[in-house]
Amino acid sequence: MSDFDYENNNGVFSSGAPGYTPVDNGAESKKSRHGHGKIIALALVVSLLAGAAGAGGVLALSGSAGGESHSQILEGVRPSTTIDVATIDTSKEMTPAEVYAQNVASTVGITTSITTNFFGFTTTSAASGSGFIFTDDGYILTNYHVIEDSSSIKVSTYDGGSYDAELIGYDESNDIAVLKIEAEGLSPVVLGDSDNLNVGDSVVAIGNPLGELTFSLTSGVVSALDRQVTLSSNVTMDLIQTDCAINSGNSGGPLFNLYGEVIGITNAKYSSSGSEASIDNIGFAIPINNILNIVTSIIEDGYIAKPYIGVSVLTVDENSQSLGLPAGAAVKSVTEDSPAEKAGIQVNDIITSANGSPISSSDQLVELVSSLNEGDQLKLGIYRQGDELELTVTVGEQIQSALANQEQQAQVEEQSMEEYQQPFSGLPDIFGFRY
């Protein structure tokens, strides 16, 4: 099977490749990377998450002087941001030329510098992508894989302006990142409704293919909706498929309908591998409705809040079903003190229904939980060693830092630099030979 490559839900469950094998408590799923044909896009990890990270820091310091104990609390303070939503009339259908004229100034180019260390030697490379203006005061939306591992980010506007950009936050599992530039009076895009799309609807993409053909327009139609795309990292996303030409450098750019509304963020294309013929006009975009709440949370709160119940699940495959197991989502692990554990869900349970609707795969369960809100009730049909049960789970909310992975990476890089600075004798042992 062909994979998808990046164009340059983390949700509630971790779903693996189809197949169900009973596991012990505490088992964890691992992401794998492999290539074949390629899809150009970011890997989405579909997981019913566990754990939480706070948005503001609280650090307790203690000490003593003269036998008296003193404690001090440091509390982080950040300016609050509120997104005001204004509505405009987009009832008039336009030509692709009119859509371009109205929105090209809302599209940006993104250039990053990526610094790496190799045996103590620092090297810097550049990468390019696209993005679009989300608010008039400088918030920019793009793909996470466009800015991943970057040491600096620059945003270029259609009028020739160039700005240093700050990474405000990102959600790797949904391949989105929010940047901020110091500018006022920008022209933001108009957001549309990606749930109001039909196969055959005309769409246009504006971006910077190859990082050189800046502010290019390509046009086409919606080829498919809710296309489940497994990326090269073995993660699945539900994307809009389009025959608009999407190439390296288009990543993060807007996909418009002919009413001038952004209904998707281009992030992937299908490409061949080896000596096979090139595959044309199979591109993908993230539906704007799928990520809007996450983006708003990053900007307003500085963290990401997602519904979760606290289980990792796998799809029960046909072979397992032939042995007498029902179709459904098999529970691989249950997070301690999670809503699922409190409801009585156990490892090796098979979830066969949710709120009266059959569940035949882990993806179905992930999609359902992702659509719920904290406090919602979820009645799950459970198959447990031949018995059928019904358990009610109260959906919880998981909070994670919008910059958690970046902070961890910075710590790793700092430790690596300390190692590089230590004296050593001779050259390193490479491929088993010592020089």
Image (cartoon, rainbow, N blue to C red):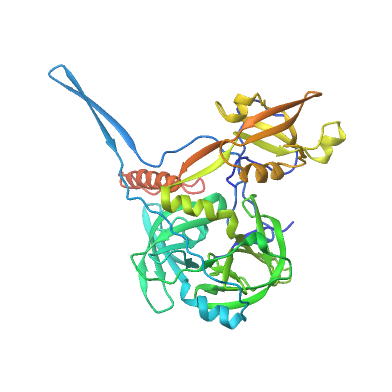
Q: Nearer the viewer, residue 128 or 381?
A: 381
Visible residue check, residue 341: yes
The image quarter in which residue 243 lies: bottom right
Horizontal side, residue 73 vs residue 233: left or right: left
Q: Nearer the viewer, residue 302 or 349?
A: 302
Coordinates of residue 154 in the picture (x, y in percent): 39, 67
| Residue 409 vertical position relative to residue 167 in the rendered view, above or below | above
- Numbered disc total: 0
Q: Nearer the viewer, residue 233 or 331?
A: 331
The residue drawn where x is 52% and y is 74% is 208
Outermost left residue: 66
Looking at the rendering, in which quadrant would you find the N terminus? bottom right
The image quarter in which residue 195 lies: bottom right
Coordinates of residue 180 in the picture (x, y in percent): 39, 61
The residue drawn where x is 46% and y is 76% is 105
| Residue 154 vertical position relative to residue 421 in the rendered view, above or below | below
Coordinates of residue 240 in the picture (x, y in percent): 66, 62
Horizontal side, residue 269 vs residue 167: left or right: right
Q: Nearer the viewer, residue 195 or 398?
A: 195
| Residue 403 vertical position relative to residue 98 in the rendered view, above or below | above
The residue drawn where x is 64% and y is 73% is 245
Coordinates of residue 318 in the picture (x, y in percent): 83, 40
Visible residue check, residue 213: no
The residue drawn where x is 40% and y is 71% is 186
